Image: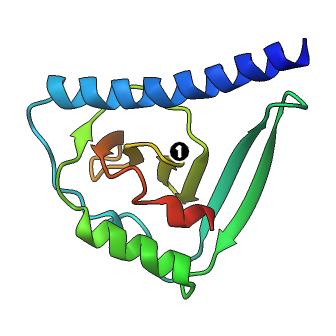
């Protein structure tokens, strides 16, 4: 019986990742306009980022949550900024909700990502003071450095 439970949990994790990919692909097809977004416009380089990692423990059947502060002078912070600078184009507006393994936040900004996935989601308060959310297709390992 424990093997069935582990198999079901593994299948559920695969479905979550596949669903994120499918939603990102559908969003890309439905929205013909992509936007250029400079993530650095929505974060304060003088302040740290907070990273929340949510891991599903298949054997114990519960999630563990780990919060980490990323100082603005750290290698991880600088690599994220470098990635943002190289990924300003191709963002698609998305109204969908997303489940992620990692969430990086600072004030009204958030970035959602699951290791090995081919998409990333960002959300923030726009200049019109309304919340907006965008997704982008990326290489499946682009942001895996965040887990190290």
Q: Is residue 76 rendered to the left or right of residue 81?
A: right
Q: Which of the pair 11/104 is nearer the observer?
A: 11
Q: Position of residue 110 (x, y in %)?
A: 49, 52
Instruction: Kindly state the secondary structure of the residue where label 1 is placed.
Output: loop
Residue 73: tell me if it is visible: yes
Residue occupying image coordinates x 84% and y 19%: 3
Residue occupying image coordinates x 79% and y 23%: 6
Q: Position of residue 143 (x, y in %)?
A: 45, 60
Q: Which residue is mark 1?
A: 114
Quadrant location of residue 44? bottom left
* Figure check: 72 above or below 5: below
Q: Position of residue 30 (x, y in %)?
A: 17, 23
Quadrant location of residue 147? bottom right
Colouring chosen for the image of the structure: rainbow
Within-10-Å neighbours for mark 1: few <14, some 14–19, many 20+ = many
Quadrant location of residue 83? bottom left
Task: Pick out the residue farthest to the left.
Answer: 32
Q: Which of the pair 76/11 is nearer the observer?
A: 11
Counting labels gives: 1
Q: Is residue 26 rendered to the left or right of residue 47?
A: left
State which quarter of the image contains the C terminus.
bottom right
Task: Pick out the residue farthest to the bottom.
Answer: 73
* Figure check: 94 above or below 2: below
Residue occupying image coordinates x 74% and y 59%: 67
Residue 97: tell me if it is visible: no
State which quarter of the image contains the N terminus.
top right
Q: Is residue 63 rendered to the left or right of residue 139?
A: right
Residue occupying image coordinates x 40% and y 48%: 122
* Figure check: 76 above or below 37: below
* Figure check: 71 above or below 69: below
Q: Position of residue 127 (x, y in %)?
A: 27, 53
């Amino acid at each position: 019986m424990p093997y069935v439970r582990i198999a079901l949990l593994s299948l559920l994790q695969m479905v979550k990742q596949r669903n994120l990919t499918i939603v990102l692909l559908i969003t890309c097809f439905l929205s013909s306009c992509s936007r250029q977004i400079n993530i650095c416009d929505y974060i304060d380089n003088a302040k740290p980022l907070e990273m929340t990692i949510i891991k599903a423990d298949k054997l114990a059947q519960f999630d563990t949550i780990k919060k980490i502060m990323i100082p603005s002078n750290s290698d991880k912070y600088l690599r994220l900024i470098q990635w943002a600078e190289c990924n300003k184009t191709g963002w698609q507006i998305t109204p969908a909700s997303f489940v992620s393994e990692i969430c990086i936040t600072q004030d009204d900004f958030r970035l959602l990502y699951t290791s090995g996935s081919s998409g990333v989601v960002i959300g923030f308060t726009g200049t019109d003071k309304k919340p907006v959310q965008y997704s982008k297709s990326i290489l499946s390992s682009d942001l895996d450095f965040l887990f190290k």
